[in-house]
Image: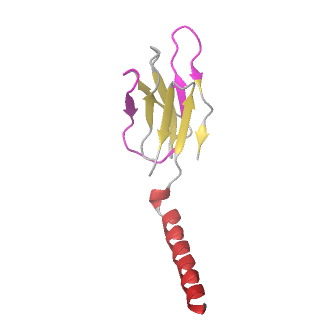
Amino acid sequence: MVRSKMLTAGKVVAALGVAAVAFSSPAAALNLSSTKDDAVRAYSYGTNTRAAVDDTKQDGNSVYVRYSRDGSNGTPYTLHNKGGAGTTATSGSGNKVWMVQACISLDWSPDRCDSERTS
């Protein structure tokens, strides 16, 4: 009985150690994601050095992501995806992306955008 308690305690300590390393590593960076009306998904995952935007609805509207990076003085960049449903546009690599906002580009009315999603 003492041996089984020691093994269980050892497993708990080992699991906590693995979790601490996993969540302290750069690969565990915060994922950012933004969607609007099932038509667009904008995101930055992993090391957050790129932003991407998926056109997820066959509706004839193009989509874009507004995103901000460290060192951009708060001025957002815009990445358009005009490829149609099922396509993805990806930014070049750069400083950490800390904000994404998914938007649908509309010809004759104001664009529809999700709230800004920040880290």
Q: Nearer the viewer, residue 51 or 1?
A: 1
Q: Does 4 appear in magenta?
A: no
- Height in image: 22 above or below 59? below
- Residue 10: % across, % down: 54, 82
Instruction: Count how many numbered circles sit on residues in the image.
Output: 0
Range drawn in magenta: 83-112
The residue sitting at 58% across, 10% down in the picture is: 109
Q: Is residue 99 visible?
A: no
Q: Main secondary structure of the magenta part?
A: loop
Q: Nearer the viewer, residue 26 or 86?
A: 86
In which quadrant of the rendered view does residue 79 lie?
Answer: top left
- Residue 55: % across, % down: 44, 26
- Residue 117: % across, % down: 59, 39
The residue sitting at the right extreme is 115
The residue sitting at 58% across, 82% down in the picture is: 9
The residue sitting at 59% across, 43% down in the picture is: 118
Check the picture and name the quadrant holding the N terminus: bottom right
The residue sitting at the bottom extreme is 2
Scheme of image coloration: secondary structure
Q: Does 98 appear in magenta?
A: yes
Query: Is residue 26 shown left or right of residue 37?
Result: left
In which quadrant of the rendered view does residue 114 lie?
Answer: top right
Q: Is residue 39 visible?
A: yes
- Height in image: 24 above or below 89? below
Q: Nearer the viewer, residue 57 or 5?
A: 5
The residue sitting at 49% across, 34% down in the picture is: 42
Query: Is residue 99 shown left or right of residue 95?
Result: right
- Residue 113: % across, % down: 58, 25
The residue sitting at the top extreme is 108
